[in-house]
Image (cartoon, grey):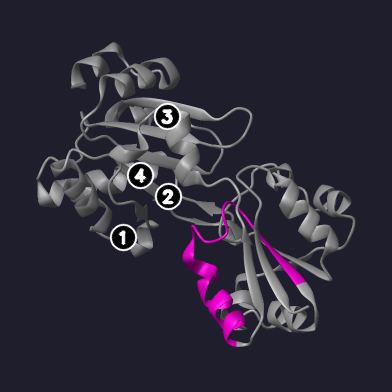
Amino acid sequence: MRELIFTGLGLHDEKGISLRGLEEARNADRVFLELYTSLLPDFSLERLEALIGKEVQILSRRNLEEENGAAVLGAAEMGKAVLLVPGDPFIATTHVSLRIEAEKRGIKTRIIHGASILSAIIGLSGLHNYKFGKTVTMPFPENASETPYNVIAQNKRRGLHTLCLLDLKADEKRFLSVKEALRMLLAIEQKKKKRVVVTSTFAVGAARVGSNAPVLKADSVEKLMEFDFGEPPHILIFLGKLHFMEAEALVAFAGAPAEFRRLAE
């Protein structure tokens, strides 16, 4: 059997793997794992290996990107290989090229999905998924870009919410925080002066979504910059037009001030 199975690990620890994913990993000839595309806050390799019952080989960014996943493809050409990925395997587009290369070599590929931050944060916040516009990533300051500001502006004009994924380099233990992201957006606002993101703008911040104790807070940008979200990973949502049920959800679930209710339509 020449097969490569991309398997999601979910959002918090090794228990996020599905029963199907666990079964495939147990039956695989080789199991690989990458931990650089996202952070699993309470992950343990030792517990994962005990769960699967075999050794799991950790791959670096270099192994998968600079070496084009040679180790994984080589294993898949000899039998059945499983690549474990944080979250849902292809929400981050990092591994698409690996799947394409596998298919070119005649290696069958399959995907076993895991929990995704895209659906998890929407469910946690109580916002409606069909009211989200384009998603954008906030880069680290050294790669500062006006794109996130522009995307927020575009979505706002359409009355849509904006999900802002905050940059991370898990292998370097670097994670952009809500406070840093807001500071960067306010700096762009100072230049562009379109009142897209000002201190009175309402937004939602969250941390460690998918854990047993996630943090969720809705308030003005000014208040969110003072709020302690704790350990990473963090995420941000800028609000478009609120349905009255969304406003109620933010008050109930995210500690939003009562004035959020007057934003609803």
From the viewer's perspective, is 11 left or right of 225? right
Question: According to the image, label 1 marks what residue?
Answer: 144
Residue 124, x across and y down, in percent? 48, 30
Q: Which residues are magenta?
A: 81-104
Q: Which residue is mark 2?
A: 166
Judged left or right of residue 121, residue 4 is right
The amino acid beneath tag 2 is Leu
Residue 72 seen from this side: yes
| Of pointers 3 and 4, the one earlier in the residue sequence | 3
User: Image quadrant for the N terminus?
Assistant: bottom right
Q: Nearer the viewer, residue 224 or 36?
A: 36
Up-down: is 247 above or below 153?
above
Name the residue located 18 percent from the left edge and 38 percent from the top edge: 159
Residue 22 vs residue 73: left or right?
right
Q: Which residue is mark 3?
A: 125
Quarter-wise, where is residue 218 in the image? top left
Q: Does residue 99 belong to the magenta stretch? A: yes
Q: Which residue type carries mark 4? A: Leu
CA gap between label 1 and label 3 equals 27 Å
Q: CA distance from mark 2 to mark 3?
A: 17 Å
Task: Locate residue 73: give its quadrant.
Answer: bottom right
SS at mark 1? loop
Q: Amino acid at mark 1?
A: Ala
Tell me: 145 left or right of 217.
left
Residue 207 in percent (x, y) is at 50, 36
Q: CA distance from mark 4 to mark 2?
A: 10 Å
Per the image, label 2 sits on a secondary structure element best described as strand
Q: Earlier in the sequence, mark 1 or mark 3?
A: 3
N-terminal label among 2 and 1:
1
Which residue in the structure is indicated by mark 4? 163
